[in-house]
Image (cartoon, rainbow, N blue to C red):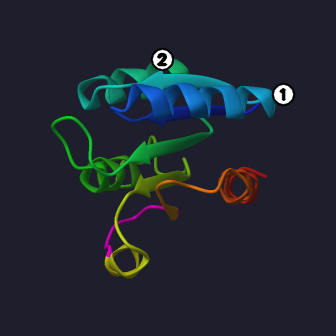
Amino acid sequence: MNKKILVVDDDLFLLGSLELLLSDEGYIVSLVDKSSLIKDSLVAFNPDLIIMDICLDDADGREICDKIKNSWLTAQIPIILMTALSHKKISELDCLADAIIGKPCNYDTLLKTISDLIK
């Protein structure tokens, strides 16, 4: 069975790039470009993993991540946060994400992280 990945980012170019990359790897991908659509997408798509930008259109991905992780319905879904912050700043972030990856990301690193989180 193919694993499902929900990708959340307001950068349409990055969404398209990740969709191509992940689809080529055999994942089923759903894209969300507005933070207001995340909740409905979680219910409708039921992802095995979420990749989400920290800086979204009108929300903070860390806060959304923590809400997802604090709900018994979705706490088991691994979340990878992506950010353009420096590596030093990334190490200082406090949230419940399973992984945080810098942007621009190395696709090999991203794919390895995904594989490790949804074995």
> Residue shown at 54%/25% (left/top)?
16
Q: What residue is disc 1 on?
A: 1
Q: Is residue 62 left or right of residue 6?
A: left
Q: Is residue 62 left or right of residue 15?
A: left
> Residue shown at 79%/52% (left/top)?
119
Looking at marks 1 and 2 on the same chain, the residue that comes earlier in the sequence is marked by 1
User: What x and y, as percent, mark residue 13?
Assistant: 46, 28
The magenta segment: 93-98
Q: Quadrant of residue 83?
A: bottom left
User: What x and y, as percent, mark residue 45?
Assistant: 53, 21
User: What x and y, as percent, mark residue 34?
Assistant: 29, 26
The answer to whether residue 6 shows anywhere in this view is: yes
Looking at the rendered image, the quarter that the N terminus falls into is top right
Query: Crowdedness of circle 1 by 10 Å Cα count: few (<14), some, many (20+)?
Result: few
- Above or below 72: residue 45: above
Q: Quote the CA–CA distance across marks 1 and 2.
A: 18 Å
Q: Quadrant of residue 97?
A: bottom left
Query: Crowdedness of circle 2 by 10 Å Cα count: few (<14), some, many (20+)?
Result: few
- Above or below 13: residue 118: below
| Element class at badge 2 | helix
The answer to whether residue 46 shows anywhere in this view is: no
> Residue shown at 32%/52% (left/top)?
54
Count numbered badges in the picture: 2
Tag of residue 44: 2
- Above or below 64: residue 83: below
Q: Is residue 23 magenta?
A: no
| Element class at badge 1 | loop
